C-alpha cells in the first residue's frame, strides 16, 4: 500500500496546488470572497478546483479500497492515469472549457474502473469466504 | 471490513452515477460549462450532486472508522440506511426541492450515528488502554 | 491510529455541525433551496461549509496516511492545529470575510505539512525497502 498511498497523496497535492491558484486568481481577476463568479478566467479555475474535489471524493476511497482488496499494482497504474488525466483536464478547461472532454472522460473512466473493479473484487472475496 | 468497504463503494457508485446525470443534464437543459445555473431542473440535479458530495466527505471516513474501531456489522447496517436515504433524497429533490426533508434528514441522521458512535467508541478504547 | 482516527472524526463532526447551521441559515435568511445566494450572511455560512469541504478532502486522507506511514503522534498534533484553525476561520469569515486570512492560512499550512510530510515519508520508505 506504500505506492497506493503515494498516488493518493500525489492527487491530493495536485488538488491543493489548484486550490492555491484559485486563491491567487481571486486577486488576479478581482473576485472578492464570498463571490464565486465575476470573471470568466476565475470561474474556470474555480470550476476546475470544484470538479477536482468532485472527482477526489470518489477517487481516494476507490483507490484505497481497490488497492487494499483487489490489486495495489493495478491501483497504482490506474491512479497514475487519473493524475495525468487531471493535469490534461486542468490545462484544457482553463484554455477553453469546451475542449475539456478528453481529460474529463479519462479521469472519469479511471474512477469507474476503480469503483466497479473494487466492487467486483469485494463480491468475489465475499463469495469465496 | 469487506462489507464496510462494499457499502462505501456502493455509495461512491451512486454518487458517480449522479455525476454522470449532471453531465448529461447540461445538454438536456442547455447549461454550458462553467455556468452552474440557468434551468431549474439542471440546478436540482447539480444541487443533488453537490449535496451528495457534502455528505460523502463525512460518511466515507465515518463509516470506515466506525467499522474499523466499533462494529463493522452496525457500520454496514447504518451505511445501507444512508445509501437508501440518498436514493429517496435524490428522487424527492428532483421532483420538488421542498419535499426533500425525509431523505435529507435520514441520511444526515445516519452520518451523525457513525460520527458520534465512532467518537464514543474511540474514547472508550482510549480509556481502556 | 486511535487518536488519529479520533481527530479525523472531530474534524468531520465540526464540518457536520457547520452543515446543520447552513441548513438553519436557509430559514434564518430566507434562502430557499436550490438557491445558494440571496443574503450575505447565508452566503458566508455556505462558503465556510464549502471551504471546509474543500479542505477536508485533502486533510482526511493526508492525516490518515501521514499517521499510518510517518508518525501518528505528529499527525495528531498537526490535526489538532487544523481543527483549531477551522474554528478560528469560521468565526472570522462569518464576522467579516476579509479577516479570514489567519485561519485560512493556518489550516492550509497544516494540510500542506501532512501532504508533503506524508509524501516525503513514503519516498523514504520506498527507498529503504
Image: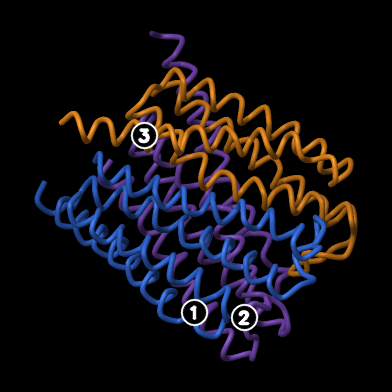
Chain colours: A blue, B purple, C orange
Could you tell me how far apart the alpha carbons at marks 2 and 1 are, in whole angstroms?
10 Å
* Image x and y of residue A11, in percent: 41, 53
Label 2 sits on a secondary structure element that is: loop
Q: Image quadrant for the C terminus of chain B?
A: top left
* Image x and y of residue B53, in percent: 55, 58
Reading the image, the residue beneath label 1 is: A100
* Image x and y of residue B44, in percent: 66, 75
Q: Residues within 10 Å of mark 2 (few under 14, many from 20)?
A: some
Q: Image quadrant for the N terminus of chain B?
A: top left
Residue shown at 58% from the left, 40% from the top:
B112
Reading the image, the residue beneath label 3 is: C120
Could you tell me how far apart the alpha carbons at marks 3 and 2 are, in whole angstroms?
37 Å
Q: Are marks 2 and 1 in contact (CB under 8 Å)?
A: yes
Q: How many marks?
A: 3
Residue shown at 17% from the left, 51% from the top:
A126
Which chain does tag 1 point to?
A
Same chain shared by disc 2 and disc 1? no
Could you tell me how far apart the alpha carbons at marks 1 and 3 are, in whole angstroms?
32 Å
Reading the image, the residue beneath label 2 is: B33
Q: Are marks 1 and 3 in contact (CB under 8 Å)?
A: no
**Residue A113 vs residue C48: left or right?**
left
Amino acid at each position: 500500500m506504500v505506492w497506493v498511498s503515494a498516488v493518493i497523496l500525489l492527487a491530493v497535492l495536485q488538488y491543493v496546488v489548484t486550490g492555491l491558484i484559485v486563491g491567487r486568481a481571486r486577486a488576479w481577476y478581482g473576485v472578492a470572497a464570498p463571490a464565486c463568479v465575476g470573471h470568466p478566467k476565475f470561474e474556470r479555475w474555480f470550476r476546475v478546483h470544484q470538479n477536482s474535489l468532485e472527482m477526489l471524493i470518489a477517487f481516494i476511497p476507490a483507490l484505497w479500497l481497490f488497492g487494499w482488496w483487489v490489486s495495489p499494482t493495478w491501483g497504482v497504474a490506474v491512479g497514475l492515469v487519473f493524475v495525468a488525466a487531471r493535469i490534461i483536464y486542468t490545462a484544457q478547461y482553463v484554455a477553453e472549457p469546451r475542449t475539456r472532454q478528453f481529460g474529463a472522460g479519462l479521469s472519469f473512466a479511471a474512477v469507474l474502473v476503480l469503483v466497479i473493479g473494487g466492487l467486483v473484487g469485494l463480491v468475489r472475496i465475499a463469495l469465496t469466504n
